[in-house]
Amino acid sequence: RERAAEIFHLYDNLPIPYAVYRASLDDDDAIRDVTLFYVNHAFEELSGLNAVDILGKTTRETFPLTGREWYDMVRRTACEGTSTTVQMCNPSDGLLYHVTASQVIHSGYCCVTYQRIAGQHLDANISHSR
C-alpha cells in the first residue's frame, strides 16, 4: 500500500500533464467514447479543471472540441497496444503540443502526456483536446 501511494504521489507531481483514459468501443470496434480515469496536477493546470470535477466523465462532456484524430489515436493505443507520438493543436487556444499515448493498466486504457511546443501557435483546424 505504501508503495502504491508513493507511485501515485510521483505521477501527481510530474511536471508534464498526464492523463489516463478508458476507451469504450461499439460493436464495430469504433470509439463510442473515452472516459477520464486519472489526471495529475499538471493536467489540471493545463485544462483549468479540477480532477474531482472531471474524473469519470467522458471527453465529449469535458472537452467537446476534441477531434477525430485524437479519438483514433486513443483507440489505437488503448485497444491495439501501440505507442504514438504526434503533434496536435488545441482548438481552444491554437497552441501546438507533442502528444504521446501508450497503453497502461490493461487493454482499453491508455495514458496520454501533453508537452507544449514552445513558440508554436497554429490555426485551430487540427483536432486536439486539452
Image (cartoon, helix red, strand yellow):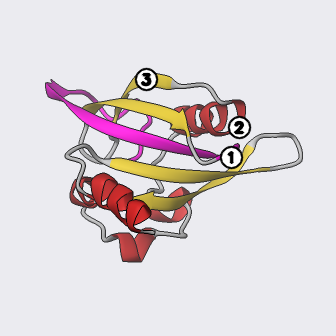
Residue drawn at 33 percent across, 35 percent down: 124
Q: CA distance from mark 2 to mark 1?
A: 5 Å
Residue drawn at 51 percent across, 60 percent down: 36
Depicted 80 relative to depicted 24: above or below: above
User: Residues at badges 2 and 1 in contact (C-beta under 8 Å)?
Assistant: yes
Q: At label 3, which amino acid type do we have?
A: Thr
Q: Which residues are magenta?
A: 106-130
Q: Residue furthest bottom?
A: 52
Residue drawn at 25 percent across, 27 percent down: 122
The numbered dot on residue 85 is 3
On the image, the x and y values in percent for residue 20 come to 49, 51
Q: At label 2, which amino acid type do we have?
A: Cys
On the image, the x and y values in percent for residue 111 come to 48, 43
The local secondary structure at tag 1 comes to loop
Within the image, what quadrant is residue 72 found in? top right
Q: CA distance from mark 3 to mark 1?
A: 18 Å
Inspect the magenta stretch and tell me whether residue 107 lies in it: yes
Pointer 2 local density, CA inside 10 Å: few below 14, some 14–19, many at least 20: many
Pointer 3 local density, CA inside 10 Å: few below 14, some 14–19, many at least 20: some
Residue at image mark 1 = 108
Q: Work out whether residue 68 or residue 11 is closer to the camera in this orientation and state it.
A: 11
Q: At label 1, which amino acid type do we have?
A: Gly
- Tell me if I can see residue 95 in this picture: no
Of marks 3 and 2, which one's residue comes earlier in the chain? Answer: 2
Residue drawn at 81 percent across, 40 percent down: 29
Pointer 1 local density, CA inside 10 Å: few below 14, some 14–19, many at least 20: many
Q: Residue furthest right?
A: 27
